[in-house]
Image (cartoon, rainbow, N blue to C red):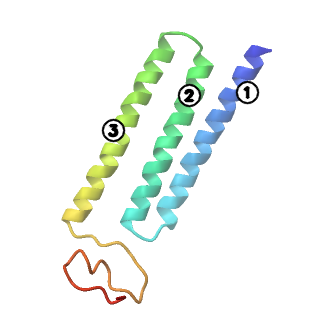
Amino acid sequence: MVEWAINLLSWFLLLTGGIFGVIGGIGLIRFPDFYTRLHGAGVTDTLCAICIVSGLVLQSGLSLLSVKLLLILVFLLFTAPTATHALARAAVVDEIEPVLEEDSDPLPDARGEPSSNT
């Protein structure tokens, strides 16, 4: 009975991780600019990794393989947000501006100009 519950939870986590991965891929296509695409990919990448590796740990049981999978998960949890932050900083340095509403001036405060909304 316990083995059946562990398998069910494992498959649920694996399917949930796969769904997060597909949603992240759709977000990369559908979002309008670099920053929203980066945010969508970063969030779903982290959630996808947590769910999939957790499901694989449950499938492998208590073994050396579980320890290796958990080390991979820790590595992913440190490197994925760091890479996302580095990409965002590089975009800011290259002065890539986000897509805002059509009638507003993009980022007037960042250039030191007064906002047109006040």
Q: Amino acid at mark 1?
A: Leu
Examine the rendered structure and indicate whether residue 1 appears above or below residue 40: above
Expressed as whole percent of the image width and height from the top left, the position of residue 53 reads 52, 29
Element marked by disc 1: helix
Query: Horizontal placement of 33 versus 51: left or right?
Result: left
Q: Which residue position holds label 1?
A: 8
- Do labels 2 and 1 touch, CB within 8 Å? no
Q: Residue at x 36, y 30 (%)?
A: 75
- Do labels 3 and 2 touch, CB within 8 Å? no
For the residues marked 2 and 1, what is the alpha-carbon distance in whole angstroms?
Answer: 13 Å
Q: Which residue position holds label 2?
A: 54
Q: Quadrant of residue 10?
A: top right
Q: Quadrant of residue 90?
A: bottom left
Camera-nearest residue between 55 and 22? 55
First in sequence: mark 2 or mark 1?
1
For the residues marked 3 and 1, what is the alpha-carbon distance in whole angstroms?
Answer: 30 Å
Q: Amino acid at mark 2?
A: Ser
Expressed as whole percent of the image width and height from the top left, the position of residue 3 reads 73, 15
Q: Residue at x 34, y 88 (%)?
A: 118
Q: Amino acid at mark 3?
A: Thr
Task: Give the crowd class for mark 2: few <14, some 14-19, many >=20 residues within 10 Å.
Answer: many
Q: Residue at x 51, y 17 (%)?
A: 66
Circle number at residue 79: 3
Task: Give the crowd class for mark 1: few <14, some 14-19, many >=20 residues within 10 Å.
Answer: some
Q: Residue furthest front?
A: 118
First in sequence: mark 3 or mark 2?
2
